[in-house]
Amino acid sequence: MRTLLLSLAFAPLVLAAQPLTQATAKPAETKGAIKWLSIEEAQEQAKKVPKPLMVDVYTSWCGPCKMLDAKTFSDARLADYVNKNFYPVKFNAESGTPVTFKGQKLENPEFDPSRVGGRNGTHQLTYMIANVQGRIAYPTVVYLDSDLNVLAPVQGYLTPDQMEPILHYFGGAHYKSKDYQTFMGDFKGKWTAQ
């Protein structure tokens, strides 16, 4: 119920979409850039040093996903906070690459190699973590605890300012002691639109 309420509270307008390609993309790392991991790498690190995971579930054809990369994930303040407080994962929701999650092998049985770069089948991991009331939308940023339990899938494009309280709520473990609305009543954002 808490996940459902969080999903509804975070549900911004989901925009139409456009391209990226692999199940786990790792862009070149630069200062102030998010250090993306594969889902397997994040799980291994969370076992050693518990931190929540933040999974960017995107598709290669999704325009708002590209905006999220260009305008939000490229923000140095956001990237630094994410790198310190999360294991960030970039996951292509329509990839044909199998992954292991919670010890279970997950695949995309409807993947069509001839449609890479366009709409394709949906990966089983996408259904498992990014589903909001039976609906999948892109982008969806999924927050998981260090035990890999889904805390909240947040659908749609968000600016750094819009994402700041969500990151602090999960990255600061405030979700363990208060609901999101109570947290927002006390939260004072430090990032302003640039």
Image (cartoon, rainbow, N blue to C red):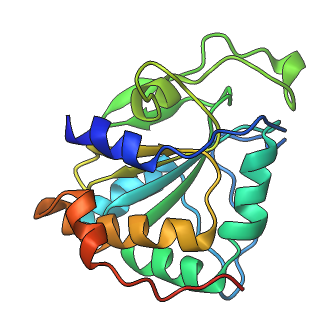
Extreme-front residue of the structure? 185
Residue 49 visible to an observer of this rendering: no
Q: Position of residue 62 (x, y in %)?
A: 78, 39
Q: Quadrant of residue 117?
A: top right
Observer-nearest residue: 14 or 44?
14
| 15 versus 127 height, above or below | below
- Give the residue displayed 31% in from the left and 69% down from the top: 184
Observer-nearest residue: 6 or 97?
6
| 53 versus 155 height, above or below | below
Q: Position of residue 78 (x, y in %)?
A: 56, 78
| Horizontal arrangement in the rendering, residue 66 relative to residue 128 (left or right) | right
| 145 versus 1 height, above or below | below
- Give the residue displayed 56% in from the left and 29% down from the top: 98
Q: Quadrant of residue 92?
A: top right
- Give the residue displayed 53% in from the left and 55% down from the top: 89
Extreme-top residue of the structure? 110
Q: Position of residue 145 (x, y in %)?
A: 27, 54
Extreme-left residue of the structure? 177
| 163 versus 15 height, above or below | below
- Give the residue displayed 73% in from the left and 61% down from the top: 69
Residue 163 visible to an observer of this rendering: yes
Classify the position of the N terminus by image quarter: top left
- How many numbered marks are there? 0
| Horizontal arrangement in the rendering, residue 36 relative to residue 29 (left or right) | left
Q: Position of residue 90 (x, y in %)?
A: 60, 52
Classify the position of the C terminus by image quarter: bottom right
